[in-house]
Image (cartoon, rainbow, N blue to C red):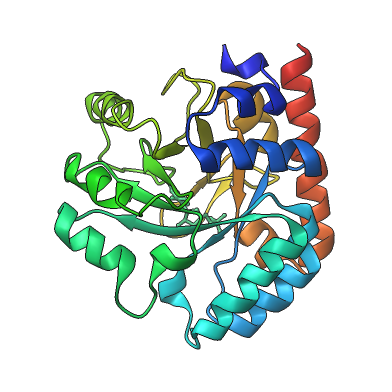
Amino acid sequence: DRMSLTYEKRAELAKNGVAKQLFSIIATKKTNLCLSVDLTSATKILDLLEKVGEHVCLVKTHADIIEDYTSDFITRIKQLADRFNFLILEDRKYADIGHTVSLQYSKGLYKVGDWADCVTAHSLPGEGILKALSSSNGVNRGVFLLAEMSSEGNLITPDYKEATVAMASKYPELITGFVCQNKDTFKDPGLIQLTPGVQLESSKDDLGQVYNTPEKVILEKGGDVIVVGRGIVAAKSPEAQAVIYKDTLWKCYLKRVSG
Ligand code: 6AU
């Protein structure tokens, strides 16, 4: 069962190149923290990553909230990714027909396909969306499919979740893992459980987000890579807070694989 396997072992089992790479980075840097840099200023994002890049395995962006987005921002975030050895996930949550998604992925202002190691997508439209995202010409790319959400009242049902996992199994070379909340959602130890909705204390925000603690998310719910946004970004010292999250999350992982 994937709960007791180390990240090193799981790197060997991964079929998607990005999953393999991410498991290896996690094992090397000893961090399973994904920072969600939900800031609207490119300069602020780059400043923050200068400070916390060494503590994270994955940086999750929402390119479409950045007010001063330019190709220079991409050049610089890629330099930081190389320097600190982290991957970039553009959290676009594609959810349209394959043809539209292939345009959204490769064209427009953001040209996500040029720079993002991986992206998020909903399974809702059917597997055309995965066909569209598969066609990135041999470049090492991956997709996290949304199988569950952290927000209260979301409309995902157990059947939808199972159908999502079944759909993903037809695209083993493309799928990096699932954005999900529970360890029973999927079994394949070569895939990554990316879990958002995490803060040091259980709580909620005013718009339906639900937070669980690192202990609960890693030890009970099976999170492999943990997404933290405001828990770090909105802290007085994001750098100090990133270290606290990194250490706490890593301890939980060590406890999980040791027992
Ligand atoms: O820690 P927060 O609440 O500040 O940020 C959580 C981040 C946000 C959401 O867009 C994203 O995680 N997210 C996702 C993802 C990653 O796809 C799915 C979900 O169910 N809940 C969620 O919060 O950038």
Q: Position of residue 57 (x, y in %)?
A: 68, 49
Is residue 183 visible from the viewing direction of this image?
yes
Front residue (pair 255, 120): 120
Q: Name which residue lies at 50% across and 83% down.
A: 71
**Is 19 left or right of 29, judged from the image as shown?**
left
Q: Position of residue 47 (x, y in %)?
A: 72, 78
Is residue 30 visible from the viewing direction of this image?
no
Front residue (pair 150, 98): 98
Q: Position of residue 190 (x, y in %)?
A: 53, 25
Q: Name which residue lies at 44% across and 75% down.
A: 65
Front residue (pair 30, 161): 30
Q: Quadrant of residue 258?
A: top right
Q: Name which residue lies at 20% across and 39% down.
A: 127
Up/down of 116 relative to 23, above or below: below
**Is 131 left or right of 199, judged from the image as shown?**
left
Q: Quadrant of the N terminus?
A: top right
